[in-house]
Image: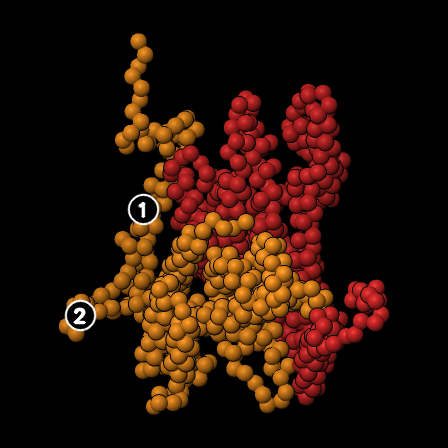
Amino acid sequence: MAAPPTSQVGAAAWARQNLFSSVSNTLTTVVIALALAYLIPAILQWAITDAVLTLKPSAESWWGYEFAPNAEVCRTAAGACWDFIAEKIRVFTFGLYPQEEQWRPTAMILLLVAMIAISVNSRFHNRWLLVAWAAAAAVMFILMQGGVLGLPLVETDKWGGLPVTLIIAVVGIVFSFPLAILLALGRQSDLPIIKTVCIAFIEIVRGVPLITILFMASLMIPLFLPEGVNFNKLVRALVAFTLFAAAYVAEVIRGGLQALPKGQFEAADAMGMSYWQKTGLIILPQALKLVIPPTMNTFIGLFKDTTLIIMISMFDFLGAVRLASNDTVWRPFYVEGLVFAAIVYFIMCYAMAAYARHLEHKLDTGHRS
Amino acid sequence: MVQAQAAAARPPKRSRSFYDKEVQAVVWQVVFLAIVLGIGYYLYSNMQANLARQNVSTGFDYLRRESGFGIGESWIQYSPAASYSRALLVGFLNTIAVAIVGVVLATLIGISIGVASLSRNWLVRQVTGVYIHFLRNIPVLLQIILWHTLITNERFLPLPRDFLAEDGPSPILGGLYLTRRGLFFPSFEPHIGWLGALAGLIIGVLVAWMIARWADRRMAETGEQFPAFWAGVGAVVACAAIGWLVMGAPTAVSYPEVGRFRVSGGATITPEFMAVLFGLTVYTSAFIAEIVRAGILAVPKGQIEAGRSLGLRESVIMRKVILPQALRVIIPPLTSQYLNLTKNSSLAVAVGYPDLVSVSNTTLNQTGQAPEAILIMMAVYLTTSIVTSVLMNWYNSRIQLVER
């Protein structure tokens, strides 16, 4: 008599199919489970059990405690020293921005987050959004720079931390986009001189590391300008980053232009449209829709690349963490600062990637070739 | 040229107006070119004037002057008395070294993780998924700095001299010293015999390649199989062993000796090299894993089922059915990952690894000749990028499906 068939449902069946389906599979499961059983407790012990985060009771605080960072306690502990982050969180976030004015970058970040939250909602996708962004950009600039409306002037070399990361990323991406469209169109153009110049620009920028372009901007722009004229360091970094981003985004847009069926171009020609009518009304609306998901991925890459501006001694978020660790008292706990920075960058990039996947799903109307 | 010929072919009487498409094309291009050249000339003349005012000489003569600075690690003879051009060469070789090792390791790890992420084992899928998503969303510069800090931080690794203490740590496997100053390990004493072995190895690879081609041809003609893989391995090992024997069969090993102040003997991997290598490898491997995964998923399921119904083993299906087809999808994005890794190796300057950017930067600060230094840097990276993409495009065109 044959044995009854094994169960196909329930936790045991699931485990049999997914973890223990064969000898080698079982072996793999056991080895990985053992490795995780060693690693996860070790990490938790370092990060939580043995870690130091000094608190003291406080009547003024809304949660009854306040942070009381103590480097001496950290030095004797076996685990992580989160006191370093509690002590330096202002430096991490705002760099060298004067402490009594730090409500301004805070307001700027909140405004930016609010604008992004509004922009990802497709209900608000109309031309008022552009007006709102222009107005918000002006408000953000006035908040950061000051010098008017009774706000004390804060020079850009004092800017740092999260606002600088966000400014470089947002400004670089926003300004690079129109430039990228022109470069992509130029590369696909029938006019040989324009095509050659666009190809040369795109390929040279993509062929060299961002760091050389940043060096070029920080050292060469002062040489390129006539005597007495100069931009500050932030503007130079923005110019470099925008040009760099444009070359990468241009290649993505070119992909969209090439993916369009030839009939679309021919139909527009047959209607007697001019080049700009054809491009603006027929080609770009379709091509740009196709490239939204890959463009988002490029933007995530560019966001991670903003960290490179620390190489021309500017202080973005990573730069501010580095700056904070120069304090000799806290020097040994640089690792914790970097781990914290890694978590912050991870959350931001992962959120963008999740939004990109959402867009990809939403825009996939099945029309693609 | 093209337009001129087209115009010549037309009937001569045709009148030309400014609104003619071809006339406009020429006019706009001339205007565009004039603007580009004008801006270029303006910037260049400003630069000349600024450099003249700062009394900085231009030109590449400085490359022959004595550099006067030391470099921590080098693959060729170098001292502060050597010229700037030699210093730049040292930097370039360091860049190439970390890029090549990084590309090889990232490819191996990336392929393993990518294949594993499609495993039937739930636990393997979860672990590889966390690896991929976590590591590709953290900036590579941060990863490099984090590795460097982990290695050099006094809380995690010992100093070499700690090994001297009674209650100090003991070396891994009896000869590996992992310290804040780097990894010290035993190595063979330099000897001409090792060059012989290397030459034998290269000849062996060529022989193995010929065996593989012969075996393929024979199988296509007669259907008879030949264990080409193991024969190839045998040929490589045999040729290397012959080269080693003929040139004197050296066996002398140098062990690292930990002293009070320095470690002598053996070989060293510096913390800077390790940090850059780990950072680049781990970050890039996460991207390669995702590319490999997508490439394998792009192979139609019917191909695998057809392989199974022919009675092929799973490993043969992977090697002969899935991978050749997946490679066509994988190679182009893999090329751009290799280029990214090479370009990202410029971040080595952040932890003080003496790569091309780091050496150029020192050169630039010493001589003030910024335009030349930046030009050299860009030209070298551009050339490296172009060479890599040419090689990879050649390989890509070889494996593409040949259609009618």
Decide: is A131 above or below A35. below
What residue is rendered at 40% in x and 89% in y? A147
Q: What is the three-letter code of the residue carrying label 1? A: Pro
Q: Position of residue A251 (x, y in %)?
A: 59, 60
Calculate the distance from the C-alpha at mark 1 to the C-alpha at mark 2.
33 Å
Query: Is any part of residue B347 visible from this angle?
Result: no
Decide: is A273 above or below B283. below
Label at residue A41: 1
Considering the numbered disc 2 on the image, is that residue within a helix, a strand or a loop? loop
Considering the numbered disc 1 on the image, is that residue within a helix, a strand or a loop? helix
For residue B53, which quarter of the picture?
A: bottom right
Residue under numbered circle 2: A62
Q: Position of residue A22 (x, y in %)?
A: 41, 26
For residue A236, which quarter of the picture?
A: bottom right
Decide: is A346 above or below B28. above
Q: Position of residue B52 (x, y in %)?
A: 70, 86
Letter of the chain that mark 2 sits on in the rendering: A
| B102 relative to B367 in the view: left or right | left
